[in-house]
Image (cartoon, grey):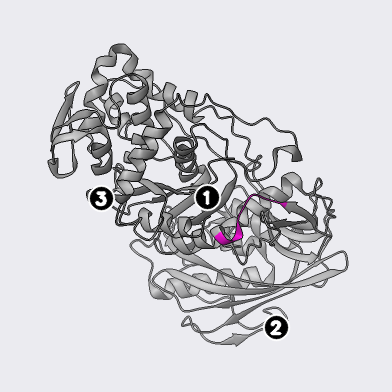
Amino acid sequence: MRSGAKVGIVGGVFALVLGGVGYGAYNILDGLGDSGVGGDTSTAADSSEVRSGPVTGEEIADTSKQFLAAWAEGDAAVAAALTNNKADAETALTGYSDTAHVTKAVITPGKATGSTVPYTVKATVSYKGATKSWSYASKLTVVRGLTTGRALVDWEPSVIHPDLAKGESLETGESSTASIEAVDRNGQVLTKEKYPSLAGILDELRQKYGEKAGGTTGIETWINSANADGADKTLLTLVKGKPGKLQTTIDAKIQAAAERGVKKFAESSVAAVEPSTGAIRAIANNRADGFDAARKGKVAPGSTMKIITSAMIIQNGLGSANAPVKCPPTVPWVGVTFHNLKDFSMPSATLKTAFARSCNTAFIKPVLPLGNKRDTALGNEASQYFGLGGDNWQAGIATWDGSVPESRDAETAASFIGQGKIEMNPLNMASVTATAVNGRFRQPFIVAQSLDNRTFATATPLPPGVSTQLKEMLRYTATAPEGTATQAMASVGPDKGAKTGSAEIDGHATSDSWFAGFSNDLAAAALVQSGGHGGDAAGPVVAEVLRAGP
């Protein structure tokens, strides 16, 4: 996806500095030579004896030492033979010098933890007269070979570099996309260092709009994306191109709050949009896998989905915000019994108070009269009025716009409370909240439509009075004593509203925590996977973001 002729390596110097892992201390700066590392010593890695059971400490030390030594020496074939995937390993290790153009590397192992050995790499990358130092840390794990019984490095591309994934490769050359200087709505520069959650987004914006922004190319080391539609990831800049300025809709103040918010909880994501326009004000993630779940995730949204269910109930004449509803502890549906949390009930509830307490049965029972239409009613509501599920958002970056498919039997009832086949992400639910507040869907976007004349997704405005009732229900949930969002939203205001959600996920002992809320002209939604009840984890994340808004 970028250009650059391959340049051969002449006189490359690789080295391994050993120490701290239990197999001696070496300081080799001119190749391994006769140091004895990787020499003709008898080890578990090259023994003809077929062994079984967990790898031993000695095997871990010997195998990792020999692998790192061969890699440091630039001997891809020898290093690859010490892994459990010789073909893939040799291709990647060869590319380290041939395509990434690493001309010097000093590898320093750290202390092993179990069968995992960490190490730091201090490298030099050279291309067409440009040279730059490059440092990073990675790790390898030693395992028992399934057929040989040998102790081998468990091959993963991340052995070469921690950000490298299957199907990806390292390359150094002239970039095919111009550099950009992305700025927020007020002209403040946005960088990966200051706003780490924007790293992938900035790469995408550069790839898509670099030329339009008027920048020039430079020389870089990058990861070639395995996804044809994905953005390459720049790891090192040898020669800077002249960046072109690209204005985004991000608000640096709100983005900073989003970054702080997700740091409070592991596996958390949040997104914020402006209801009146759809402009994306913040996107942030704190996930071990690095996945941008805020805009690409696909998980059940739990009771935050009751925003759309409420609109469907109101529009089909099945209830209204202040009309009475039944909230029994349980309700049957085609052989399946649905429960409220701890089987609570509300003797004299309205749709608004049931929404505030998050009574599941009150959002399932009223839909029975729809008959055959009930299997498609929620999906129709979501697509026609909330702009979801059409796979047609053109935000300027890759997004996923939710799914509310037709359902059957018990899955239909489950969908009304955000379970079953329903899949959303925080950007979707921030947009849902924005639609409820604004009265009509505005497609989220991060760069101006005029930049490339792309077509925005549209939806029918909510009928008169529906938005008013939804806002009344959201406000009550965030302010009433019995509201499940009141505690989390206590520091937000004065104009505010919210909905909590908990989604049960197969295989997870703890439910996902969801929270959607608004304050003035800002709507936000957060997901904390395995975070428990909505107000417990996702609530504080959203509150942090909303406090930074208008």
Label 3, residues with CA under 10 Å away: few <14, some 14-19, many ≥20: few
Q: Is residue 458 left or right of residue 360?
A: right
- Magenta segment, which residues? 247-253
* Secondary element at tag 1: loop
Frontmost residue, 184 versus 42: 184
- When the figure is inspected, residue 433 is found, relative to residue 165, above or below; the finding is above
Q: Nearer the viewer, mark 3 or mark 2?
A: 3
Residue nearer the viewer, 490 or 368: 490
How many marks the image carries: the answer is 3
Kindly report the distance in space between the C-alpha atoms of the residues bearing marks 2 and 1.
Answer: 40 Å
Left or right of residue 63: residue 509? left
Q: Nearer the viewer, mark 2 or mark 1?
A: 1
Query: Mark 1 or mark 3, which is nearer the start of the sequence?
Result: 1
User: Distance of mark 3 from mark 2, alpha carbons?
Assistant: 51 Å
Is any atom of residue 57 visible in this view?
A: yes
Q: Residue sitting at 28 percent across and 30 percent down?
A: 414
Per the image, label 2 sits on a secondary structure element best described as loop
- Label located before the other in sequence (3 or 2): 2
Residue 374 in the image, given as x and y percentages of width and height: 32, 18
Name the residue type under label 3. Ala
**The label number, if any, that marks residue 292 in the structure image:** 1
- Coordinates of residue 193 in the picture (x, y in percent): 62, 66
Q: Residue at x 13, y 41 (%)?
A: 344
Q: Earlier in the sequence, mark 2 or mark 1?
A: 2
